[in-house]
Image (cartoon, helix red, strand yellow):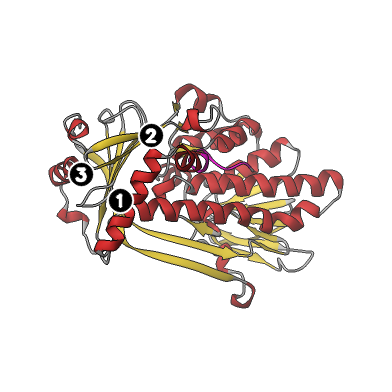
Amino acid sequence: MRTQVVIIGSGPSGLLLGQLLTLAGIDNLILDRASKEHILGRVRAGVLEEGTVRLMDEAHSGARMHGEGLPHEGFSLAFDGRDHRIDLSGLTGGKRVLIYGQTELTRDLMDHRQAAGALSIYEAANATPCDFDSHAPYVTYEKDGVTHRIDCDFIAGCDGFHGVSRRSVPDRAIRAFEKIYPFGWLGILADVPPVDHELVYANHPRGFALCSMRSLSRSRYYIQCSLDEKLDGWDDQRFWDELRRRLPVHHADRVVTGPSFEKSIAPLRSFVAEPMRFNRLFLVGDAAHIVPPTGAKGLNLAASDVHYLFEGLLEHYQDRSNASIDAYSARALARVWKAVRFSWWMTTMMHRFPDTSDFDQKIQEAELDYLTHSRAAATALAENYVGLPF
């Protein structure tokens, strides 16, 4: 079998890239080791930057997103028992974010790919990018006990942090930068109305908390926890009680409780791999970088990678130029590192660190006070939160 672009990974980045390529008349094939049902069962982020929304529209896959998504023009920073609203729209000339679950975005892209007749192969075991440092790359995989080979022009590694794409690159050709944070997020999903119509980020002596949502009837809540916490030590009642303790009273009184249907503990890390291109192999999204969820950048960074790679592939096939492909890694990483910085800053400002000194704590409090009393500082936060331009 032969195609122009093999995409390894059927998450949002792989599907979005595939849909854009298909609409441009560039042949592509998606491989994923998981089943379609497993992919649609994963619960992930749901805050979309305007650039991500535009790419979904460009992929002709944004209709349901616009119909069901929740536009947010601000969010609240809660500390000292009070709310301090960040007016995203007012500070950025009318920009905003859109709340729309990653699972729903993935479903939309899958449906449009199927309608377009583009090929996706699920439960493809042991997918392996080969000879990508040559002019004749190919990918092998196993399906139903048979080994298959797909020859191609390019390989897009959209298979996440634990995927095969980055692991296939020789150690000497790649450099990793990493920071592990000394805590995690304990999160739940429950079919209860959100505590507020916008997100609430809370800094509290007991630790960080986040009140988020997937819809007007489904809420996503997180609390900071130690890395050695176990899920079986947290029944729903204990979680709701702890969440309330970390919120200002007016929010705590509005928390509607109910049984959770998903509960997990996620460690926090920052990770960047450089470069993101290895001749005919490109790393995209979580395959190349991970950010703490504090700044809502993970899914949006994957989308911006897709933007740069699609531009490069389009220019290669339509204009017979490799200028944008050659610039892919540098362009993507410039935006990645700004988002990594923002996510690190938000994480540092909103969490309580186990080794924080009295001095460090006073600096954090001064940072929050300055941020909420300086329009210039709030504008910098808002510009990053709604998404820097491509």
Task: Tell me which amino acid carries mark 2.
Answer: Phe
Residue at point 65%, 48% (across, down): 29
Residue at point 44%, 33% (across, down): 100
Task: Tell me which amino acid carries mark 3.
Answer: Arg
In three-dimensional space, the C-alpha distance between marks 3 and 1, rounded to whole angstroms, equals: 16 Å
Regarding mark 3 in the picture, which secondary structure is present there?
Answer: loop
| Earlier-in-chain disc, 3 versus 1 | 3
Q: Quadrant of residue 140?
A: bottom right
- Residue 207 is left or right of residue 179, and the answer is left
Regarding mark 2 in the picture, which secondary structure is present there?
Answer: strand
Image: 296 above or below 98: below
**Residue identifier under label 2:** 75
Name the spot of residue 359 as percent of width and height, x first: 28, 62
Q: Residue furthest bottom?
A: 172
Q: Which residue lies furthest to the right in this view?
A: 320
Disc number for residue 365: 1
Magenta part of the chain: 383-389
Name the spot of residue 181 as percent of width and height, x first: 36, 63
Residue at point 73%, 64% (across, down): 279
Residue at point 56%, 64% (across, down): 273
**Residue identifier under label 3:** 246
